[in-house]
Amino acid sequence: MRIDHVAIYVRDLEEAKSFFEKYFGATSGARYHNPKTGLQTYFLIFGDGARLEIMTRPQLLPPNESALQTGLTHIAFSVGSREAVDQLTNRLAGDGYQVQSGPRVTGDGYYESCVLGPENCALEITE
């Protein structure tokens, strides 16, 4: 068994698509639109075949302000080396994205940083 994909809701579908293409090398499939429900989605495919579905619809509720809640907490991307973690973290920070932590070695031995991407989606960048 394997996880086929993870899906997240966003308000600005095109911004989120561009972000993951630019910083994480995603390739986007065709935009899907269901005119009955207003749902619009893209499947983003990453180099190893992992897939992320980004979705939007008109009736989205505002996000909860607390990071301490049940549900999806973050998406982790392995970039291959500590140097790559540092480079991507610095690039994102330089482009105005908020670095929440790191780069650092965590208590359980991971080298990682955490950056808030589009619409405050927490992205963990690991080696």
Image (cartoon, rainbow, N blue to C red):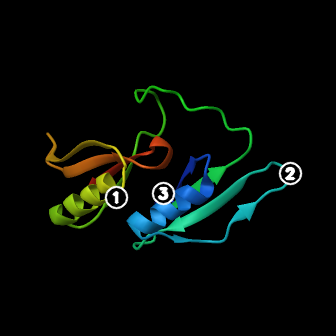
Q: Is residue 93 above or below residue 48?
A: above
> For the residue carrying disc 2, how many other residues have a C-alpha within 10 Å: few (<14), some (14-19), or many (20+)?
few
Between circles 1 and 3, the one closer to the viewer is 1
Between circles 3 and 2, the one closer to the viewer is 2
Q: Residue at x 61, y 32 (%)?
A: 62
Residue carrying label 3:
3
Left-right relation of 74 to 12: left
Q: Which mark is residue 107?
A: none
The three-letter amino acid code for the residue at tag 1 is Phe
Q: Where is residue 73 shown, x and y percent of the image?
A: 41, 39
For the residues bearing labels 3 and 2, Cβ distance under 8 angstroms: no
Q: Where is residue 14 shown, x and y percent of the image?
A: 60, 59
* Quarter residue 43 falls in: bottom right
> For the residue carrying disc 1, how many other residues have a C-alpha within 10 Å: few (<14), some (14-19), or many (20+)?
some
Q: Which mark is residue 36?
A: 2
The three-letter amino acid code for the residue at tag 3 is Ile
The three-letter amino acid code for the residue at tag 2 is Lys
**Disc 1/disc 2 C-alpha distance (Å):** 34 Å
**Disc 3/disc 2 C-alpha distance (Å):** 28 Å
Q: Where is residue 26 shown, x and y percent of the image?
A: 47, 69
Q: Is residue 113 above or below residue 82?
A: above
From the viewer's side, name the closer residue of 23 and 107. Answer: 23
Q: Earlier in the sequence, mark 1 or mark 3?
A: 3
For the residues bearing labels 1 and 3, Cβ distance under 8 angstroms: no
* Quarter residue 116 falls in: top left
Residue carrying label 1:
77
**Helix, strand, or loop for circle 3?**
loop
> For the residue carrying disc 3, how many other residues have a C-alpha within 10 Å: few (<14), some (14-19), or many (20+)?
few
**Disc 1/disc 3 C-alpha distance (Å):** 15 Å
Q: Is residue 50 visible?
A: no
Left-right relation of 38 to 88: right
**Helix, strand, or loop for circle 2?**
loop
